[in-house]
Image (cartoon, grey):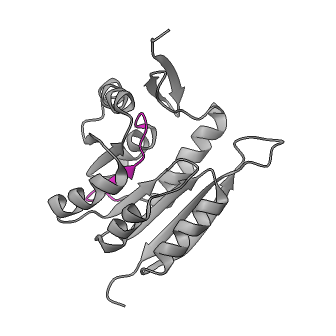
Amino acid sequence: GTSARTETIGGKRFSVSPQSFLQVNRVQTQVLYETAQEFLAAKKDETVVDAYCGVGTISLFIAEDCKRVIGIEQVAPAIKNAKANATTNGVKNAEFICGNAEDVLPRLFSREGGVDAIVLDPPRKGCEEAALEAIAKSTAKRVVYVSCNPATLARDCKYLAAHGFTLSAVRPVDMFPQTCHVESVVVMNKFFGL
């Protein structure tokens, strides 16, 4: 069927179409998103970018903490879900852009003039270097990276570390018990003017 299904995570309702991605383990998914939210520690006056936002799960978790959140996702049906999910959950300060992170981020940063923080939750292959380059050149002070692949996470963190970011915290979340797979959340900070 082509119908979307609805999941409730952390008191928020998410509609997910078949082409869109959602974590399978609902209990640990909430732990994962709450960890990302905690690490992000967004402030009321901040603009946050949520790259690889899928159906807007993390975006809608963090929207209540910040001034505005901008989600980016290349899967068009997922963006449609994200917009609908924002409406369903009464979130008015989230906007969603359809496109590849590596294309959208540079344009977005030049248009916005400044963003405060970035959340990344890419697929297993990690981030494209062009996306990381745009982040490194941006005004973002914090990057929260959610990863299902420790190898690409390490590679991407190494790039950001070489471009002014400092790894501040790492927390694994066991999304798939009794397997070798683990989700990790890291936060990297950039200290301007030191």
Which residue shows up at 39% across the image and 31% down it? Answer: 78
> Is residue 47 visible to the viewer in this orientation of the structure?
no
Q: Nearer the viewer, residue 89 or 131?
A: 131
Q: Position of residue 29 (x, y in %)?
A: 60, 39
Q: Position of residue 31 (x, y in %)?
A: 61, 44
Position of the C terminus, as image quadrant, is bottom left
Which residue shows up at 45% across the image and 26% down it? Answer: 14
Image-based side of 151 in relation to 194, left or right: right
> Is residue 29 visible to the viewer in this orientation of the structure?
yes
Q: Residue 67, relative to residue 29: is it above or below?
A: below
Q: Quadrant of residue 77?
A: top left
Q: Is residue 80 magenta?
A: no
Q: Position of residue 177 (x, y in %)?
A: 79, 41
Q: Which residues are magenta?
A: 43-56
Which residue shows up at 17% across the image and 65% down it? Answer: 113
Q: Quadrant of residue 74?
A: top left
Q: How many marks?
A: 0
- Furthest toward the bottom, the residue is 194
Q: Residue 57, relative to residue 40: is it above or below?
A: above
Image-based side of 178 in relation to 96, left or right: right
Q: Position of residue 38 (x, y in %)?
A: 51, 56
Q: Nearer the viewer, residue 27 or 140?
A: 140
Magenta region, mostly helix, strand or loop? loop
Q: Is residue 50 magenta?
A: yes
Q: Residue 36, relative to residue 114: is it above or below?
A: above
- Furthest toward the top, the residue is 1
